Image (cartoon, coloured by chain):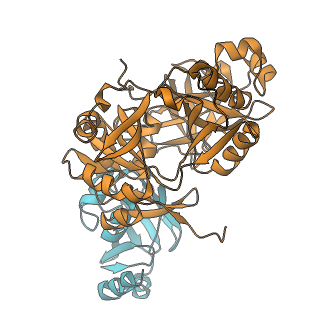
Chain colours: A orange, B cyan
């Protein structure tokens, strides 16, 4: 146990006023649920718009110390500083593009999953917008700052608010406050005026739904939160439903479904491996990842529908049809939008094809399960 | 009705005790999505884990408030676990137990004592 007092986000008093049940998460006091409860919060987000405080996460800007003024040159320069840490194509980011990527250790193990974007504005080239996970942010930021050296400066923005608005009505709700956001495509971002302030808004999230993440200075966070909640289509949603939503969306939770021993191939995150980077092999763990892609793979993350009995949660053994342990659940629970339990876990590739009959062991009892394609619940992103 | 510090209730009629979780427990758990109950015939010892109640976010043990043999489990909770939230101290009961020693219940809290206990949490 740590003696460090919990940090709070700029929305702490707003959560208490809404009846949020606070819980420690990654060093922060965060709302796990509001009086509506996890199940209804989950379903509300799928049907309307859910408002999430994700201020515990780590937004930051990496800015070239001496930009040349030429957009492409400056973007290439800043991207080249960070590329050695990740397996994604940062040089190839288009203005306004936001990309999911992975920070890797020398063995190709995942140190974090993060978002890195290239600003849209011509005057902002030579800058990257970076958002990392809460629990890993100090190490991530230290690694990025070290890689940048004196060529660029990392400016943390995690003292303010980061607010996610997710769900099929998110676009209509936010368009009323921030005209133009409805035109953003999935995984792009730009600056928008909101009540006279310029805020960075990305069309992104971790629920599988259409939606936005809004970076807002500390002093403006509660006002924006309150204005969004004034819309009757919006309800506050806690970490409990955030977890069940991302689980249904098949999205891994770092520290559970991926860690520093797991490679992107094992984690079934091959889409985050840039073709150019794989060809040149210029990222950490490239040799291991090439070998895994060539077939030397011992485990892979799969999705499971649990067909009977209790939800199988993190740590539950995964068994083959004969009852032999072949892996473990890394996250699992009841899926409100599917009306039954689902899980993610690691199994040998021979057991990974969808349709493979397996079992999960819960409190000593083997329950039937089957490998299914992820996402469990279809993504509904806004792609232009 | 008597209560435990683990938020189970027990109601004794003759030598048959009906056992469930309290309204406070149900509210704390949130939406119940699965209940695992002991089978009829199982011998329970007071204080041992006898059932598991699962919400969307977590699994929680339910402890036997009193010793005895399970005579019935509430089969209705299999298809309708939400009954635990809707009527925790009524149709959301978990098991019926033929008690070994009806005096065991004397060690549990009455409603006033339980409410006083809740006020300390």
From this viewpoint, which residue is outermost toward the front?
A69
Please identify the quarter of the rendering in which residue A319 is found: top right
Left or right, A237 with reference to A155? left
Quadrant in the picture for the C terminus of chain A: top left
Please identify the quarter of the rendering in which residue B65 is found: bottom left
Q: Position of residue A343 (x, y in %)?
A: 51, 36
Q: Position of residue A217 (x, y in %)?
A: 43, 53
Nearer to the camera, A3 or A313: A3
Q: Where is A237 relative to B113, above or below?
A: above
Left or right, A151 with reference to A313? right
Nearer to the camera, B107 or A42: A42
Q: Position of residue B64 (x, y in %)?
A: 46, 69
Q: Where is B102 relative to A210, above or below?
A: below
Q: Residue at x 39, y 64 (%)?
A: A21
Camera sees residue B78: no
From this viewpoint, which residue is outermost toward the left?
A232
Q: Position of residue A152 (x, y in %)?
A: 68, 38
Nearer to the camera, A122 or B29: A122
- Number of marks present in the image shown: 0
Nearer to the camera, A195 or A23: A195
Please identify the quarter of the rendering in which residue A69 is found: top right
Camera sees residue A6: yes
């Amino acid at each position: 146990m740590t003696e460090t007092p919990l940090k709070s986000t700029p929305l702490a008093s707003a959560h208490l006023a809404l009846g949020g049940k606070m819980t420690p998460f990654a060093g922060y006091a965060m709302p796990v649920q509001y009086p509506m409860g996890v199940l209804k919060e989950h379903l509300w987000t799928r049907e309307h718009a859910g408002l999430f405080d994700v201020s515990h996460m780590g937004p930051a800007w990496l800015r070239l110390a001496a930009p040349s003024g030429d957009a492409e040159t400056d973007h290439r320069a800043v991207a080249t500083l960070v590329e050695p840490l990740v397996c994604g194509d940062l040089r190839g980011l288009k203005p306004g593009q936001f990309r999911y990527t992975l920070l890797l250790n020398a063995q190709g193990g995942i140190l974090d999953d993060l978002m890195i974007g290239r600003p849209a504005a011509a005057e902002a080239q030579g800058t990257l917008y970076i958002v990392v996970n809460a629990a890993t942010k100090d190490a991530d930021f230290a690694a990025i700052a070290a890689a940048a050296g004196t060529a660029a400066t990392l400016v943390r923005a995690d003292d303010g608010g980061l607010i996610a608005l997710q769900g099929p009505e998110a676009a209509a709700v936010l368009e009323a406050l921030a005209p133009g956001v409805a035109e953003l495509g999935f995984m792009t971002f730009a600056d928008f005026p909101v009540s006279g302030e310029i805020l960075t808004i990305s069309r992104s999230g971790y629920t599988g739904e259409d939606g936005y993440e809004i970076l807002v200075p500390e002093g403006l966070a509660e006002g924006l939160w309150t204005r969004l909640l004034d819309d009757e289509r919006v309800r506050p949603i806690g970490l409990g439903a955030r977890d069940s939503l991302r689980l249904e969306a098949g999205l891994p939770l770092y520290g559970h479904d991926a860690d520093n021993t797991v490679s992107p191939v094992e984690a079934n995150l091959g889409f985050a491996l840039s073709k150019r980077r794989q060809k040149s092999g210029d990222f950490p763990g490239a040799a291991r990842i090439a070998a895994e892609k060539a077939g030397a793979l011992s485990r892979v993350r799969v999705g499971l529908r649990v067909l009977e009995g209790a939800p199988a949660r993190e740590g539950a053994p995964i068994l083959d049809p004969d009852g032999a342990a072949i892996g473990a659940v890394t996250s699992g629970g009841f899926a409100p939008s599917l009306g039954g339990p689902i899980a993610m876990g690691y199994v040998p590739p021979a057991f990974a094809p969808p349709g493979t009959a397996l079992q999960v062991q819960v409190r000593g009892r083997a329950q039937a399960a089957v490998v299914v394609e992820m996402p469990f619940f279809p993504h509904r992103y806004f792609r232009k | 009705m008597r209560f435990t510090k683990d938020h189970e209730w027990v109601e004794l009629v003759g030598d048959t005790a009906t056992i469930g979780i309290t309204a406070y427990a149900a509210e704390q758990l949130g939406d119940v999505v699965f209940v695992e109950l002991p089978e009829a015939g199982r011998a329970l010892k007071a204080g041992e884990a006898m059932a598991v109640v699962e919400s969307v976010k977590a699994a929680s043990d339910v402890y036997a408030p009193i010793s005895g043999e399970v005579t019935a489990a509430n089969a209705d909770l299999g298809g309708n676990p939400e009954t635990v939230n809707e009527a925790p101290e009524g149709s959301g009961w978990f098991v019926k137990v033929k008690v070994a020693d009806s005096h065991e219940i004397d060690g549990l809290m009455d409603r006033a004592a339980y409410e006083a206990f809740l006020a300390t949490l």
